[in-house]
Amino acid sequence: MKRLISVGEFFELQKSDKKLVVLDCRFDLMNKTYGIDSYKEGHIKDAYLINIEKDLTDPVGQHGGRHPFKDRNQLKAIIEGFGIDNDTIVVTYDDGDLQGAGRLVFQLNNLGFYNAFVLDGGLIAYKANGGQIETEERKPQKSDKPFDVKIDTSFMVDMEYVKSKLYDENTILIDSRSHPRYLGLEEPVDKVAGHIPSAKNYFFMDNLNLDDMTKSSYISDEKLKERFKELDPKKEIILYCGSGISLMVNALALDKIDIPYKIYPGSYSDWISYDDNKIATGEE
């Protein structure tokens, strides 16, 4: 499925007469004002700011992880507030790391809305290729057309499903966090270090072309294929991370090379919220 859009394709959309809504998804978990500060300093022309933790995340409960998906009815109302209806094309972007932008696209997919795309290269590629930047804070208006929701959970799994697939020969569980966190050598956020048993580690950052995102956030498709060559696309692949955000970078990478997968939104922080769930450390 195509979830990424190149900066060239985005420019063509901007010039077209199609209804386009652009959403700025920049955030920093360690700096709560990063999103609004960055937006005010400069953003894509006509873009609106969306707050990852307020608009896309439900309050933390006993289970569900540190960033549970927003209640669907509330998310529907928020999306409608940005003037989005079923005839709209939505493009999301961030600084090029694709975490916030990817998260929003997958939550829109959960509402059955698939006319949503992540800007490959984010603001870096946009600026490098002559995109117009503005500092004016845009205020959206609700569309007079309906935004109809058709819930799609076909690409998502929950804790019980993951638990039923541990060490299943036809399942590949992928941990998207850094290798030291996967090994259980460090844990800067969650209360227990380690990983979900049977998981393999593919650190999401290793997909990214950090030295030059002017054309794409990602390393080449050839390098991605080499990186994921051990994955059998005939098996069920399940992605998780710490709280359901950074796994989106692995998900979009697998999209690029046509490897199907499912996501576990609650991720590791949800897994460890159940006392009887086992935790593994070391390499598997």
Image (spheres, rainbow, N blue to C red):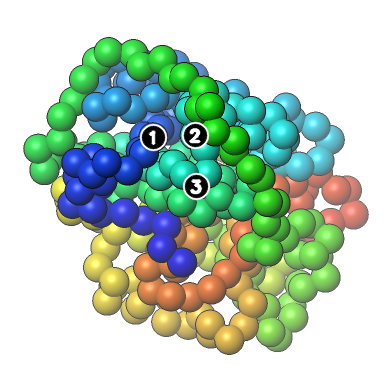
Quadrant in the rendering for residue 107:
top right
- Mark 1 vs mark 3, foreground winner is 1
What residue is rendered at 45% in x and 48% in y?
A: 116
Residue 280 shows in the view: no
The answer to whether marks 1 and 2 mark residues whose Cβ atoms lie closer than 8 Å is yes
- SS for dot 3: helix
What residue is rendered at 24% in x and 27% in y?
A: 45
The three-letter code of the residue at mark 1 reads Val
Answer with left or right where residue 244 lies relative to residue 2. Answer: right
Which of the two residues, 83 or 25, is positioned nearer the viewer here?
83
Q: CA distance from mark 1 to mark 3?
A: 13 Å
The three-letter code of the residue at mark 3 reads Val
Quadrant in the rendering for residue 225:
bottom left
How far across and how far down the image is residue 172, in percent?
62, 75
Q: CA distance from mark 3 to mark 2?
A: 13 Å
Residue corresponding to mark 1: 21
- SS for dot 2: loop
Please say if 48 is above or below 248.
above
Residue corresponding to mark 3: 105
| Between discs 1 and 3, the one toward the N terminus | 1
Task: Give the class, few, some or many, for how many residues have Cα within 10 Å of label 3's Cα (few <14, many ≥20).
Answer: many
| Between discs 3 and 2, the one toward the N terminus | 2
Task: Give the class, few, some or many, for how many residues have Cα within 10 Å of label 2's Cα (few <14, many ≥20).
Answer: many
The three-letter code of the residue at mark 2 reads Ile
Residue 107: which disc? none
What residue is rendered at 23% in x and 53% in y?
A: 9
Please say if 142 is above or below 234.
above
Assign the C terminus to one quadrant of the image: bottom right
Task: Give the class, few, some or many, for how many residues have Cα within 10 Å of label 1's Cα (few <14, many ≥20).
Answer: many
How far across and how far down the image is residue 176, in percent?
53, 57
What residue is rendered at 51% in x and 54% in y?
A: 114
Residue 84: which disc? 2
